[in-house]
Image: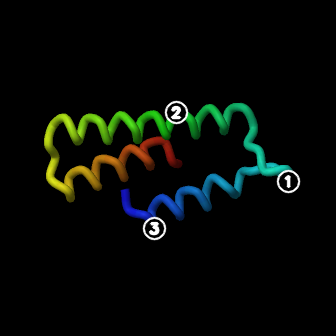
Amino acid sequence: MTESLRANYQAYVDTFRRPDGTLGDMLELKLRHTMRVVSNARLIAAEEHFADDERTAAVDAALLHDTG
């Protein structure tokens, strides 16, 4: 995953944080789900021997798959 995309995603998530820094229960669940999808995308890309650019695209897509 590109570092700039991850930083931008984290900044987006942070806009939903409460003053104490936490996320609501459903947003925390959504974030954990997204991180599991990213992890699975990395595993699939490794097992399928994706080229570097394909691996990056797969992981980036996984990060953004529910953003909307």
**Colouring method of the image:** rainbow
Q: Earlier in the sequence, mark 3 or mark 1?
A: 3
Residue, disc 1: 19
Q: Position of residue 12 (x, y in %)?
A: 61, 58
Residue, disc 2: 33
Cα distance between the residues tagged 3 and 2 = 21 Å
Q: As shown in the figure, which amino acid type bears the numbered disc 1?
A: Pro
Q: As shown in the figure, which amino acid type bears the numbered disc 2?
A: His
Tell me, yes or no, whether the two marked residues, 2 and 1, touch with CB atoms within 8 Å: no
Local crowd size for mark 3, using a 10 Å CA cut-off: few (<14), some (14–19), many (≥20): few
Per the rendering, the mark at residue 43 is: none
Task: Establish if 1 lies above or below 23.
Answer: below
Determine the residue located farthest toward the bottom in the rendered image.
Answer: 4
Residue found at x 16% / y 46%: 50
Residue found at x 44% / y 47%: 63
Local crowd size for mark 2, using a 10 Å CA cut-off: few (<14), some (14–19), many (≥20): some
Q: Earlier in the sequence, mark 3 or mark 2?
A: 3
Left or right position of 19 against 51: right
Q: As shown in the figure, which amino acid type bears the numbered disc 3?
A: Ser
Cα distance between the residues tagged 2 and 1 = 23 Å
Q: Earlier in the sequence, mark 2 or mark 1?
A: 1
Task: Establish if 63 lies above or below 24.
Answer: below
Residue, disc 3: 4
Question: Could you say which is closer to the camera, residue 15 or residue 40?
Answer: 40
SS for dot 1:
loop
Q: Position of residue 32 (x, y in %)?
A: 56, 35
